[in-house]
Image: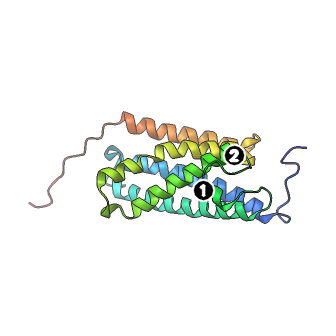
């Protein structure tokens, strides 16, 4: 009997469906936040109609929204009885008995994302070099989140539409990284407003 055939209906297990849906939404938002972060570092992508600070603001807000959905995903996964995952598995990788490796990757990605967002909220009080180094760890956290999404989620692991979300996310991040590395980042000369 397959996992999907044994899956409960929405009326029987609303937490299971909420955990699945918030997991997908948070993964999409984290992917969009990563791409916006990549775009916000590129001065060549800014224009008078869409300044760089707008991309940075959108990046920050999408990141926080993704963290909120991720929090709901984690809480509903733990509260739901469909799988047995403890509260410790949220912060300590490798202790989940359910798909241990793949849940551990999600735990590591979550820990990194929380550290990056927390330090970004106090960025002005930190050394800029340390903040940037920590912020760049997101490039390692996203593939871990991608593998967690692909191998833990039933919608991706069983060839459903989640697989297409994972493929589209990988293509989107690949395009963003390729654009970031291929474009020159020479700032335009500053024009004086004083005459």
| Residue 121 in view | yes
Verify CB contact (< 8 Å) between mark 2 and mark 1. no
The quadrant of the picture occupied by the N terminus is: top right
The quadrant holding residue 59 is: bottom left
Q: Nearer the viewer, residue 106 or 15?
A: 106
The quadrant of the picture occupied by the C terminus is: bottom left
Q: Secondary structure at mark 1?
A: helix
- Residue extending farthest to the left is 195
Left/right of residue 111 with respect to residue 3 in the rendered view: left
Residue drawn where x is 35% and y is 53% of the image: 131
Reply above or below: 3 against 90: above
Q: Callout 1: few (<14), some (14-19), or many (20+) C-alpha neighbours within 10 Å?
A: many
Residue drawn where x is 56% and y is 49% of the image: 108
Which callout, 2 or 1, points at the residue further toward the start of the chain? Answer: 1
Q: Nearer the viewer, residue 145 or 126?
A: 126
Q: Secondary structure at mark 2?
A: helix
Q: Position of residue 173 (x, y in %)?
A: 51, 41
The quadrant holding residue 87 is: bottom right
Residue drawn where x is 54% and y is 52% of the image: 30
Colouring scheme, one of rainbow, by chain, secondary structure, one colour: rainbow
- Name the residue beneath numbered marker 1: 26
Q: Position of residue 28 (x, y in %)?
A: 59, 51
Q: Callout 2: few (<14), some (14-19), or many (20+) C-alpha neighbours within 10 Å?
A: some
Per the model, the C-alpha gap separating discs 2 and 1 is: 20 Å
Q: Which mark is residue 85?
A: none
2 or 1: mark nearer the eye: 2
| Residue 162 in view | no
Residue drawn where x is 64% and y is 64% of the image: 72
> How many numbered callouts?
2
Q: Which mark is residue 100?
A: 2
């Amino acid at each position: 009997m397959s996992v999907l055939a044994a899956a409960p209906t929405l009326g029987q297990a609303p937490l299971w469906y909420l955990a699945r849906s918030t997991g997908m939404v948070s993964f999409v938002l984290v992917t969009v936040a990563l791409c916006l972060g990549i775009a916000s570092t590129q001065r060549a992508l800014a224009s008078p109609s869409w300044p760089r600070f707008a991309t940075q603001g959108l990046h920050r807000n999408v990141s926080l929204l993704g963290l909120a959905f991720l929090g709901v995903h984690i809480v509903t996964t733990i509260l739901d009885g469909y799988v047995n995952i403890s509260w410790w598995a949220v912060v300590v990788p490798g202790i989940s008995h359910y798909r241990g490796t793949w849940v551990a990757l999600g735990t590591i990605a979550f820990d990194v994302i929380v550290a990056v967002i927390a330090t970004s909220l106090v960025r002005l009080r930190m050394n800029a070099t340390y903040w940037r180094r920590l912020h760049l760890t997101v490039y390692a956290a996203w593939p871990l989140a991608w593998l967690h999404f692909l191998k833990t989620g039933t919608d991706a692991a069983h060839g459903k539409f989640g697989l297409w979300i994972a493929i589209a996310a990988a293509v989107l991040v690949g395009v963003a990284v390729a654009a970031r590395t291929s474009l020159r980042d020479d700032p335009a000369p500053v024009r004086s407003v004083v005459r």
